Image (cartoon, rainbow, N blue to C red):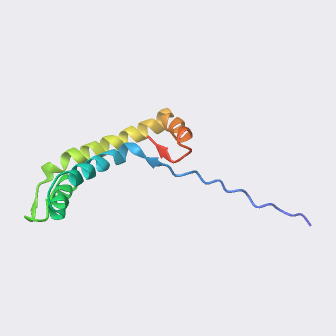
């Protein structure tokens, strides 16, 4: 009777992409570092990310355009770094935890 070995399943490590996350970290830091109450900080964060201001109930998409533009640019940079091969070097340097 012949015994068959199970095929080894190699899972690719999931690394955290830095380029798309940097705009979110920047907006979060700016919202938390400004003075004021927690509600004011949440209003500022919400306005900068989705354009909605909960305290007044208004929607201003022009306030969210810089965030979304930077996020889309980050995704493009991440995809380009994958194609060029830069992310492989970044993953090796950070033991597989981060990518560009």
**Is residue 8 or residue 1 the one in the foreground?**
8
* The N terminus lies in quadrant: bottom right
Q: Is residue 34 left or right of residue 94?
A: left
Residue 8, position as x, y percentages in the image: 71, 56
Residue 6, position as x, y percentages in the image: 76, 61
**Is residue 35 or residue 12 the one in the foreground?**
35
Picture residue at 10% right of the left edge, 65% below the top: 55
* The C terminus lies in quadrant: top left
Q: How many circles with numbers are drawn on the protein?
A: 0
Picture residue at 29% right of the left edge, 46% below the top: 23
Picture residue at 16% right of the left edge, 64% below the top: 39
Q: Is residue 27 left or right of residue 3?
A: left
Q: Quadrant of residue 69?
A: top left
Q: Residue furthest right?
A: 1
**Is residue 5 or residue 18 the one in the foreground?**
18
Picture residue at 48% right of the left edge, 32% below the top: 84
Residue 79, position as x, y percentages in the image: 42, 41
Q: Is residue 86 left or right of residue 25?
A: right
Residue 58, position as x, y percentages in the image: 8, 61
Q: Residue furthest front?
A: 35
**Is residue 74 or residue 38 the one in the foreground?**
38
């Amino acid at each position: 009777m012949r015994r068959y070995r199970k095929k080894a399943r190699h899972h690719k490590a999931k690394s955290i992409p830095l380029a798309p996350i940097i705009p979110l970290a920047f907006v979060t830091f700016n919202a938390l570092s400004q003075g004021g109450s927690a509600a004011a900080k949440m209003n500022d964060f919400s306005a900068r990310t989705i354009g909605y201001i909960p305290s007044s109930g208004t929607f201003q998409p022009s306030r969210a355009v810089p965030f979304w533009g930077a996020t889309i640019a980050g995704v493009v940079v991440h995809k380009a770094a994958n194609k060029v091969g830069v992310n492989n070097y970044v993953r090796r340097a950070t033991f597989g935890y981060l990518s560009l």
